[in-house]
Amino acid sequence: MNRTSVKIVIAGGFGTGKTTLVSSVSEITPLTTEELLTSASVGIDDVTGVESKTHTTVALDFGRITISPDVVLYLFGTPGQDRFWFMWDELAEGAVGAIVLVDTRRLDTSFPAVDYFERRGIPFVAAVNQFFGECEYTDDEIRSAMELGAEVPLVWLDARDRASSKLALIALVRHAMSRLPQAA
Amino acid sequence: MTGEAWDGDDETAAGRFVPLYVLVNGRTSPRDTNLDLATQVIAVPVDSSRLEPEYLQILGRCGGWISIAEIGAYLHIPLTIVKVMVDVLLEQGYLDSGAPAQHKVVDMRLLNAVLAGLERL
Ligand SMILES: Nc1nc2c(ncn2[C@@H]2O[C@H](COP(=O)(O)OP(=O)(O)OP(=O)(O)O)[C@@H](O)[C@H]2O)c(=O)[nH]1
Ligand SMILES: [Mg+2]
């Protein structure tokens, strides 16, 4: 096989745990790369309700997982702010799919990500990040609040935990497989 | 820039942009549109002694397969610029590239391999 790169996008609103998830499964310490900003990329950060957040990711963090001697999986965390949509296009193009992280304290911050992948028909799973262990919502409540389609898998995870993050990645890959024409 | 909202008038970013832009001879986008930030490249064993230091620096990172995003991260070069520079090196035969992630039809065999790899983690 030719040397092949596979991409998975880790999306979700500001401070939902994207970088944490990438760190927990990556075989390298996540790297940060930057992209030049354009005049179209101006916006204001939304920091409401994020108490313990000390800084904002303005660049792109990513990690890697060697799958086989020929295949490397790259996990790209999307920038947390909406002004970086131009980078989402580059990340999403050719990707297996996306994990959209959801913080139940601020469900709305992940709406744009759900909307983004839904509109483009890119496979994604919604992953509720259990910041404080317990969550008062049921799957159905989250599904309806997020307006998730019935076919979109909903998983619960702790982004700090490697095994838990790995299961979310597996759920995404299975979902992407189920959507390939051959699987029908 | 970390921790601050960008106000659209960032002197530092603009100042850094100019020399890098000149470096790539006025090219703003790669010739090969298949180049993705996850595309991996590797150095071809040829004489590179005539290359400019900025290009040599990139080649120096490509002893084994490495993605464009990783090169950008290690050398602190913005992605747009790395892409053009890598493309120049590909065009001139200093680098080889693997299958681009972009435009690739993800097939069942590849996804099966990814699944098996993740399950082994
Ligand atoms: N308790 C708990 N804290 C978490 C969890 N995941 C992330 N955090 C914390 O939440 C904060 C935000 O996490 P990040 O991974 O930086 O979030 P992000 O989505 O990358 O943030 P931006 O890139 O700025 O949008 C950090 O302080 C993390 O330590 C979790 O599962 N449980
Ligand atoms: Mg982050």
Image: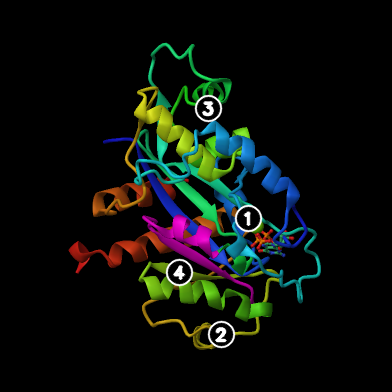
Tell me the residue that label 2 is attached to.
A138
Q: Are marks 1 and 2 on the same chain?
A: yes
Tell me the residue that label 1 is attached to.
A19
Tell me the kind of residue under disc 3. Answer: Ile
Residue A151 location (% of width, % of height):
36, 78
- Real-space Cα distance between discs 2 and 3? 50 Å
- Real-space Cα distance between discs 4 and 2? 16 Å
Tell me the kind of residue under disc 1. Answer: Thr
Tell me the residue that label 3 is attached to.
B58
- Real-space Cα distance between discs 1 and 3? 26 Å
Q: Are marks 4 and 2 in contact (CB under 8 Å)?
A: no
Q: Is mark 1 within 8 Å of ligand 1?
A: yes
- In the picture provided, is A17 more to the left or to the right than B83? right
Q: Are marks 1 and 3 on the same chain?
A: no
Looking at this view, is A135 or A114 the one in front?
Answer: A114
Chain hosting mark 4: A
Q: Secondary structure at mark 3?
A: helix
Asked if A49 appears above or below A75 in the picture, the reply is below
Residue depicted at x 25% and y 64%: A180
Asked if A1 appears above or below A125 in the picture, the reply is above
Tell me the kind of residue under disc 4. Answer: Val
Q: Earlier in the sequence, mark 4 or mark 1?
A: 1
Tell me the residue that label 4 is attached to.
A125
Chain hosting mark 1: A
Q: Are marks 1 and 2 in contact (CB under 8 Å)?
A: no
